[in-house]
Structures are given as structure tokens and as C-alpha cells.
Amino acid sequence: MTISDLAVYLQMSQSSLYKLVQRGSVPGHKVGRHWRFHKVSIDRWLQESSAKPSRPSKK
């Protein structure tokens, strides 16, 4: 998948997705100047991240 394909799949903006990818939050690989993603890895990442308990907000 390309970053635009992934943005549609995750229903989020490409700019938000770029920020997550650059932080290393989303599993992907850079090929030259372009990011590529495997759907299986993304689905696994989504399952793992939804299974984690949310952190309490700092106040």
C-alpha cells in the first residue's frame, strides 16, 4: 500500500499519517523517497494497539 492508500484505509489525513510514520508509530518501510505498507502488518498493528489499555491523561 502507498501512504495515500493507507490514509483511505485508516480514514485519516495523509499529513497525520506522515507524522505517525516518521515517529515510528505505524509499521512501514521506506523505498527510496516513498513509504510502503503491508496490509497484514497494518491490521496486526491495529489489533495490538486497540488491545492496549489507554493511558490516563496527564493533568
Image (cartoon, rainbow, N blue to C red):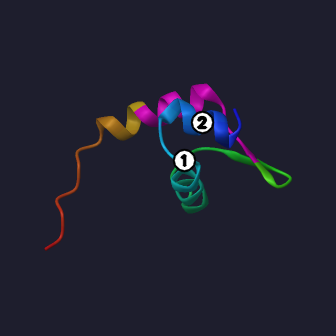
Instruction: Tell me, yes or no, whether the two marked residues, 2 and 1, touch with CB atoms within 8 Å.
Output: yes
Say whether residue 11 is left or right of residue 22.
left
Give me the residue at 49% from left, 30% from top: 44
Give me the residue at 39% from left, 36% from top: 48
In-front residue for pair 11/39: 11
Q: In the rendered image, which quarter contains the C terminus?
A: bottom left
User: What segment is highlighted magenta in the picture?
Assistant: 35-46
Q: Between disc 2 and disc 1, whose residue precedes? A: 2
Q: Which residue is mark 2?
A: 6
**Magenta residues: mostly which secondary structure?**
helix
**Which mark identifies residue 26?**
1
Say whether residue 10 is left or right of residue 51.
right
SS under mark 2: helix
Residue 1 at x, y percent in the picture: 69, 32
Q: Amino acid at mark 1?
A: Val
Quadrant of residue 28 within the rendered picture: top right
Residue 39 at x, y percent in the picture: 61, 27
The crowd level at tag 2 (other Cα within 10 Å; few <14, some 14-19, many 20+) is some
